[in-house]
Image (cartoon, rainbow, N blue to C red):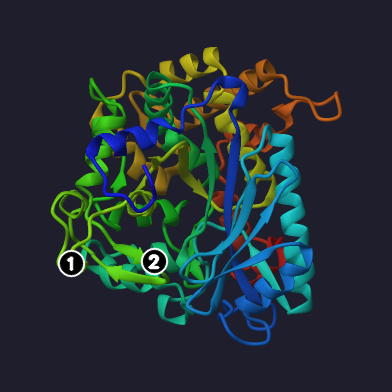
Amino acid sequence: MTDTAPLSREQLIHAMSKGEKPKDQWRIGAEHEKFGFDKSTLRRPAYEGENGILAMLTGLQRFGWSPVEEAGHVIALERRNAEGFTASISLEPGGQFELSGAPLKDIHDICSETGQHLMEVKQVADQLNLGFLGLGFDPMWRREDIPVMPKGRYAIMRAYMPKKGSLGLDMMLRTCTIQANLDFDSEADMVMKFRTSLALQPIATALFANSPFTEDRPNGFLSARANVWTDTDPDRTGMLDFVFQDGFGYERYADYALDTPMYFAKRGETYVDLSGQSFRTFMTEGLDALPGERATAKDWADHLTTLFPEVRLKQYLEMRGADGGPWSRICGLPALWAGVLYDAPSLAAAWDLCKDWDIADHERLRRDVTRLGLKAEVAGRSVRDIAVDLVAIAKQGLKNRARFSGGMVDERGYLSELEDIADSGLTPAERLLDLYNGEWKGDLSRVYRDFAY
């Protein structure tokens, strides 16, 4: 199947199955987003200007990053590591800076990669009077205060989002996340990992909840970012009930994607607006906006990136339930999921935590943790208790993996902050609220000073 050849449904299913890898080739990928701000005004930086996002992208090229352009604008950077795998720095719609890390062997490598990236970003940002902040939701600025980046797909999405939900533009402009990407070795392995991680995603949301402020005041949520996803676009978000049904596999996920309305197709450097139209029709009959054309493998790959469920399947599984946060939690999220999903006994133990939850439990829990965090309940248990168990299961899984740094320390240490959060029952958001109501005396500018990278 070439990138430009017409597609069949069978080829779509095969494309996902090509992600299967034997266990000894499994890798871990980490992604994180962060808000830039001008240290003098705290405002989000524009793309252009002496201390804008373009200046950041230009400055980072001194560290061996290569520019990626679209319509004459630098919109991303790429760099290969010693093994030939590529990491990228890309821009979210409001200029949120994202590192999409290379697929790496262990959490030690991920934490090293993340630390190097943040060091490079700080060196350039300091020269531009910029700072960067890891939170799940912009704590101060309104939608209309936030500059929009010059990427073609975002113009289409900004026009379409308000037709499907009231918070889609907030998702684009005012949220940041941490994600972890993990492999599978077979369809059955993918299904088990998908079901377990999807059911437990709200537990991760609670552990990482870090967005209690909107427009300079508390917003009533612990994870405003997670709440945004409950009213963004029901066609492409949520807990995917069908994942828990008998017969789930690549074919069922392909059908879900085929029936999710499109945003666009890219032709050269131009994004063609296909918002609301059917990929299935594009594949079988074509669409008026692209006369004589049929969907290609590249179109399919692009379309899969416009689905936003709590766990997403491409040629790997993406964990999407966590708020942005500090360096330690950027390392902690992939450690949590690698410990759970990459050790068979731990995966079975994690499934035992959630296997009896019904579909209504999944959706209710997803919504409850946005406000209640670790104090939410499901099936007679508190999320805090489940989180304590989940972190312990992950810790045992990392012990069983036995991946050592310098021959001495394994990966379990990266879970220490999550252990503390679960044991205390206090989310990061509640700790921020305690500071806001106490030491900070309602001065939210302190978050930029005390919690910037």
- Secondary structure at badge 2 equals helix
Residues packed near mark 2 inside 10 Å, few (<14), some (14 to 19) or many (20 plus): many
Question: At 28% from the left edge and 62% from the top edge, which residue is drawn?
Answer: 263
Is 243 above or below relative to 178? above
Is 213 above or below relative to 402? below
Viewer-side label of 1, 2: 1
Q: Amino acid at mark 1?
A: Pro
**CB-based contact (under 8 Å), mark 1 and mark 2:** no
Q: Position of residue 331 (x, y in %)?
A: 66, 42
Disc 1: which residue: 291
- Secondary structure at badge 1 equals loop
Quarter of the image for the N terminus: give it: top left
Question: At 72% from the left edge and 28% from the top edge, which residue is drawn?
Answer: 411
Residue furthest to the top:
345
Q: Nearer the viewer, residue 198 or 377?
A: 198
Q: Position of residue 430 (x, y in %)?
A: 55, 50
Q: Nearer the viewer, residue 148 or 139?
A: 148
Q: Nearer the viewer, residue 14 or 329?
A: 14
Left or right: residue 407 compared with residue 356:
right
Left or right: residue 335 compared with residue 125:
left
Q: Amino acid at mark 2?
A: Asp
Task: Decide if residue 424 is in sight here.
Answer: no
> Residue 170 — which label?
2
Is 25 above or below relative to 235? above
